[in-house]
Amino acid sequence: MSKKTASVATPSVQSGAGAAPAFLLELLEAKSPTGHEFAAQAVVDRHVSPVAATYAKDALGNRIATVNPKGGPTVMFAGHIDEIALIISYIDDKGFLYFDFLGGHDLVIPSGRRVRILTKNGPVLAVTGKRAVHLMSAEDRGKVPQRHDMWLDIGAPDRKAAEAVVRIGDPAVYDVGFELLRGTLGVARAFDDKAGCYIVMEALLRLARTAKLAARVVSVATTQEEIGTRGAQVAAQGLAPGLSITVDVTHATDHPDADNRKFGRTTLSGGPVIARGPNINPLVFDRLVTVAETLGIPYQLQAEPRPTGTDARAIQMANSGVACGLVSVPLRYMHTPGEIVDLAVVEQCVQLLVAFAKSLKKEETFAW
């Protein structure tokens, strides 16, 4: 970790939602399950399309914004806009809905939650149900409920009534929003990876205001990351960037149930996390560290011994190969409705990407 800790601009610490940037707040409120990213796409369209030199969408739903389109090298910034969710798979005769998972879920999380089912006629409120503790045997109380042991209750009296408002394949997300926890710490349903999407797009908006830019910068709000980095794969193949920085979240391991010997040491407010390992180009890594130290941004290092669980794994292998970097926001309680990040670190990540792009020289290559 860098010992340089010069102050950087951070979000307001006022109480209420005003402590986070409006763009980020709108992304967090947008319900965008994997494969159904419409609401988050609309937020990116509204904030980025009027500013970008070129702006495009593709068949997988990616949003692709460019500044300095005649510059070089091409650097691709990637942050995904999809989130984990449920998908309706069966409706029984009594009108109860059963579901499968979109993305990785901990089975202890869904029970007793309010969710919104995203239907063709608008959101429908539902509650995730399971057998109450009073009706369980002592043995059952110690078991984690399986997916088929839980259901969604929309208050429908029978299957016909339920099918009048919900269809098989409709997605559903937890019905919780952003709040400040304390200081610059925020809690929300989908910081993974609305924070990363905000960072790459906000960096592009700031770069659009600078004249000193050699590189062509393309920021992509990628889709379907949670089920296999699918949007990033298509975008990278089409753009053929020379280098790329993926921005995602990583596990903050500064809570009681995280053994640092197993998971490393990453603190919530310790600054952006810069990855090292075979998925990461060593020259890109060195440049990110140099830029962070020059700016005085504190940073943390994370070892990644194999292809990462991020868009970087797909981008690196596009076409003849892409020089990849990975910057992550430390996050507690990933893939739960109560994800926590430090908004000050989110801002530091934006500044790091802006400075990284500005550091690139005309047609610079990161071959090694």
Image: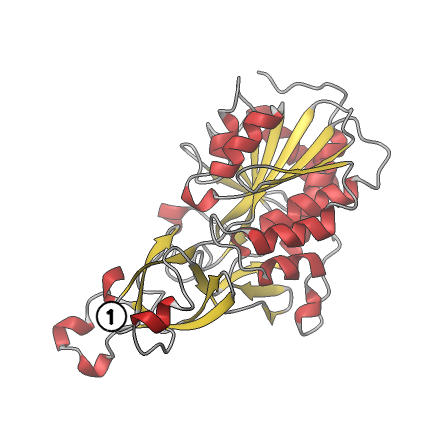
As rendered, which of 309 and 51 lies closer to the eye?
Answer: 51
Residue 170, relative to residue 294: is it above or below? Answer: below
As rendered, which of 186 and 235 lies closer to the eye?
Answer: 235
Percent x, y of residue 164: 40, 68
Q: Residue at x 19, y 70 (%)?
A: 142
SS of the residue at dot 1?
Answer: loop
Q: Residue at x 62, y 27 (%)?
A: 239
Q: Badge 1 local density, few (<14 within 10 Å), some, or many (20+)? A: few
| Amino acid type at image mark 1 | Asp
Image position of 3 (left or right of 93): right
As rendered, which of 5 and 168 lies closer to the eye?
Answer: 168
Image position of 107 (left or right of 39): left
Tell me the quarter of the image containing the N terminus: top right
Residue 304, relative to residue 198: is it above or below? Answer: above
Percent x, y of residue 132: 25, 79
Percent x, y of residue 161: 36, 73
Image position of 302 (left or right of 260): right
Residue 128 visible in the snapshot: no
Residue, far bottom: 134
Hey, which quadrant is residue 115 in on the image?
bottom left
Residue 355, relative to residue 249: is it above or below? Answer: above
Hey, which quadrant is residue 258 in on the image?
bottom left
Instruction: Count every numbered label the image shows and give the total.
Output: 1
Residue, far right: 211
Q: Residue at x 59, y 16 (%)?
A: 367
Tell me the quarter of the image containing the C terminus: top right
Check disc 1 and report the residue beneath it.
Answer: 93
Percent x, y of residue 256: 40, 62
